[in-house]
Image (spheres, rainbow, N blue to C red):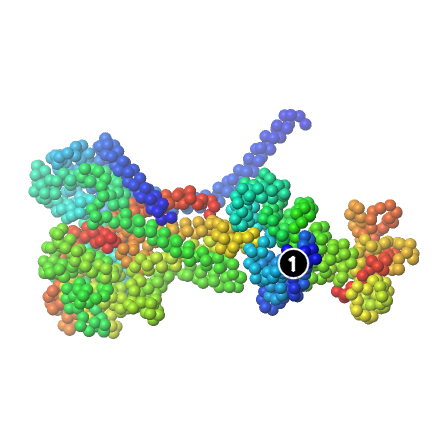
Amino acid sequence: MSVSAISDDRSTLKSRLRRAERVQRLRAIGLVLPLFLFILIVFVTPIIILMTRAVDNPEIADSLPLTSAALANWDRTDIPGEDVFAAFAVDLVAAQKNKATGLIGKRLNYEMPGTRSKVLQAGRAAEKLTAAPYKEAFLKIDPLWGEIETWKVLERASHRNTSFYLLKAVDLQCSADDEIVNVAPDQALFRDVFIRTLGISTLVTVATLLLGFPLAYMLATLPPKHSNILMILVLLPFWTSLLVRTTAWVVLLQTEGPINDLLLFLGLTDERLQLIFSRFGTVVAMTHIQLPFTLLPIYSVMRTISPNYVRAARSLGAGPFHAFWTIYFPQTMPGIAAGCLLTFILSLGYYITPALVGGPTDQMISYFVALYTNKELNWGQASALGTILLMATLVLYAVYNRLVGIDKMKLG
Amino acid sequence: MGTTNDPFVTFSDVQKTYDGETLVVKNLNLRIEQGEFLTLLGPSGSGKTTTLMMLAGFEVPTHGRIEMGGVEINNVAPHKRNIGMVFQNYALFPHMTVEENLAFPLQVRKVAKDEIAKKVQRALDMVQMPQMSKRRPAQLSGGQQQRVALARALVFDPKLVLMDEPLGALDKQLREHMQIEIKHIHERLGVTVVYVTHDQSEALTMSDRVAVFNDGIIQQLAKPSDLYERPENSFVAQFIGENNRLSGKVASVNGKSCGVEIPNFGLVSAIPVSVQSVGSPTTLSLRPERVRINPESGAYANQFDAEVQELIYLGDHTRCRVSVLGNSNFIIKVANAEGVPSLTPGQMVRVGWKPEDCRALDAY
Amino acid sequence: MFKPTLKVALLASSMLVLVACGEEKKEEQASSAASNTTSTTATSEAAPATSTNQTASVTPAPATGGLTVVSWGGAYQEAQRKTIFEPYNAKTGNVIKEEEYNGEVAKIKAMVESGTVSWDVISVDTATALQGCDDGVLETLDYSKILDKAKVLPGAALDCAIGSDVYATVFAYDTAKLPNGPASIKDLFDLEKFPGKRALQKNPFVNLEWSLIADGVDPAQVYDVLGTPEGVDRAFKKLDTIKSQVVWWEAGAQPPQLLADGEVVMTSAWNGRIANAIKEGKTFKIVWDGQAPDLDMWAIPKGTPNLEKSYEYLAFASSAEVQSALAPYIPYGPTNLDAVALVDAELAKSLPTHPDNLKAAIPLNPQFWGDNGEELRARFNTWLAQ
């Protein structure tokens, strides 16, 4: 065979290979594409929207367009001039017509409590203002409009993006001097709540590990006849709804409930303990709900560990505890890592259990996200809290990855 | 430690049951000599592994006594028995390097650090893997893991090493190589080895003595050659090597020989091994290589007509399946040497064997 | 594990903050440069938005047949079904489609903003009515299509909502457990005289007023005091004294349950819920001292396709006959002044509007909560979680 014939053969072979692979590749893409689009549409997009909502700030810019433009040229050293007030008057009349003054008032109220009614009042009064000088007229309506701080806040709020919500989510604010300062102590809340969220999640994770590890060990080592029954006992609550399990804890933990009855009967306490609406109750209920999440990965890893390892260690001279601790336990690490991560991250987002079993000081960050979303209609604040929680979770995940190595984890 | 006269390990009337209903080990009596290589051979479920586990301390005998060096060890915890053990699938600790695996038993014994390093290196040299100390078990081949497991079981100089089917996961060639290697290490170190396998050729190759287990009972405990040449019951005859069986009735017993009537076919002379009395049923056991085709007439006391059924050529010999005395699965190994008659299926031949090669055993 | 994660979390949040403020500084410069463009786009964006709103309200209602009315469920909606929905269906031949909600304003807001309004008439509380009106979420009512405003209880005819009934937040206890029970708001705050847990609504409304009353403020002056920052501080300070002993409820069905379970010795509640429990045989007693009457209101979300039918429904539901029929089912008072006389005299004694019950009542002042609700709620929620 000649040289050229060989190279011809090679090229056709290559192109044939490519053609054969192309069909396969297209088929593979075709299979993955729906899932990819699904994830993009229902998972990634909402998160992006959530994060933009956290800095989105359209209220003032939309409702007071002329004022916003006029304030852009303001030097922020003294009360703005007549041009700003004139623009403000025109904007307010338009806003009054569109029922937008409430929105403006609401937005300003976030940064300056007590201004909502004054904005509404100014809106009603603005309709009667017909001629200059507007500045004097507004100062007469309320001294609020003669304060430089009002205008600084208004100017800050007139940008289409704001860091207000994000700052507020960690109890910070921009002061009148444009410096970042802590919010007043009677408003400081979220830092505590974030720390509380992390603390409760950690506590629940540790508790599920302490309870779940021995149980997983039992499940993995008992003969199937017994372990199957035990497994059903573990899984049965797992199959019932979260709400049902939480409500069951409400019944159990009540002051007049069975746990208190039992404690009194056994003489362990003299009076009924406050178990429900407490941190204790929250952690207990969450631990119960999260237990399978920690247990199952550990169990599935334990199932793969041959009893021969511990036997080998024993035969080599290690006592039972030493063999367990140096040989068995390290091999369960992938399961422990996976189970704990799962429980910790799921715990961060708990809402219904603390809401039903916990007291006001046991509420986690999700409670406030819900509060701002459903009741206060402050979606910017809700988004900011969600964004911070998401960021914190990602950072924790990265740290965890460094410490444990996600690739070493086994979820089951 | 016991002298050469005293056995090193003794099992006395040992029984074991897991469920309280069936005995996995029935009345085991076994003496293991210092320095010997003893194999426990048997099909799965025969009680050989349970026996090993009782010796290692992972199972407690339900009844009876196990002694080591004259001391009862029934209730001694496994880690205090100072017995090395090689497991099926090796049980190398996956989260430790080879070196750490080998150092483990030494660390547990609080051996000094430099001493550990020396011993680990020596053990690795012994199994011819001096370069692998930093690797993890998952990075080693099956044969390499096997060697490390062996080194680990020996590194702390135990007097007794137990091996539970250690070569089961290796391919045939490597297995045969390792058999020889283990044998050599045993000879060099003089350590006592108790070895469990279900592979009879492995048992024959390696052992000083073999205990054949079946149904929780030691069927025969003997040197490999005795086991093959002189099986004491039909199970052993059948389990060890290839075997032809003929069922019949004892017609006469006369000291060292007996006559066995194969119903409808004829009388075979054999040596009585476990026959009771005239008229009792018996199984004759006959190794395939001890049968001759077309012998000179009168050369053997047993000569019968046979029909060739099938021929399988195997290089050095040919397996010839014939039908004789009502048994159509009668195998004859014919060495492919000069002067061997050529055979064809369907051909009628005469076959013959000596009475002393034909053992009359219990009815199977 | 806790310590490093904590540090990391703090680090992460502080980093975020730095980034955020840095951005703002840049933003300021950038936006001042491009201010003109921004404002023009803003105006042109605002204009079409307004016109859509107008078109929505001008478009004639498509004949969708049913009218969707949303209320609070439970015994209350049951009573409304008997006295309003069913008679309305019978009279007009329309079919009311009922739905339930828990006052989630977010749902209404989302519907109105996305232009897919599927609720025609909703039952709201006063604070929502006022706020929804200011936010432009609720239709401004044309009273000529409902009834003469003069016939409505003063304060119950708002721009965007009309009162449907008067309920009250009262407090109650179980006479079986406390034979000599509390008689005044002061007793509610007296942990020595009446030790034990008490349940209050997870809402500053009523709680702050009661705190001030317990602190010696005359009920009539309560909003004057609460209108000042010092007054708010004073209220929270008083509330602090019982904070550790309070169980907070959110759903109206919780207080009678908490009382029946013995979880608390006394509880604030909506008077109808306690009255129902008494009807079911419970030995509860309502304390009318310091009762806080409030209105349930009907409102129409902006942009409903059934606007005319919705007005028709409001006119029916506000009529004296219909209003007076509610009390036998649930002891809430009518807002139509003509209806007061139609209520059975004996029954009237259990209504919040009965003169005897109104003696020490907190005056109805929805405007106060409309103006100050937001920040008081924010402070209350912070106070709760601290």
Comparing B155 with C63, the one in front is B155
Task: Point out the image quarter for the C terminus of chain B.
Answer: bottom right
Q: Which residue is pictured at 52% across the width and 48% down the height? A: B110
Comparing C180 with A48, the one in front is C180
Q: Is residue A302 visible?
A: no
> Up-down: is A69 above or below C174?
above
Residue B276 at x, y = what percent?
Answer: 79, 69
What is the three-letter code of the residue carrying label 1?
A: Val
Q: Is residue C7 visible?
A: yes
The residue tagged 1 is: B9
Does residue C6 appear to the left or right of B164 in the view shown?
Answer: left
Does residue B354 appear to the left or right of C358 in the view shown?
Answer: right
Q: Looking at this view, name the residue that lies furthest to the right.
A: B297
Task: Point out the image quarter for the N terminus of chain B.
Answer: bottom right
SS type, badge 1: strand
Comparing B195 with A246, the one in front is B195
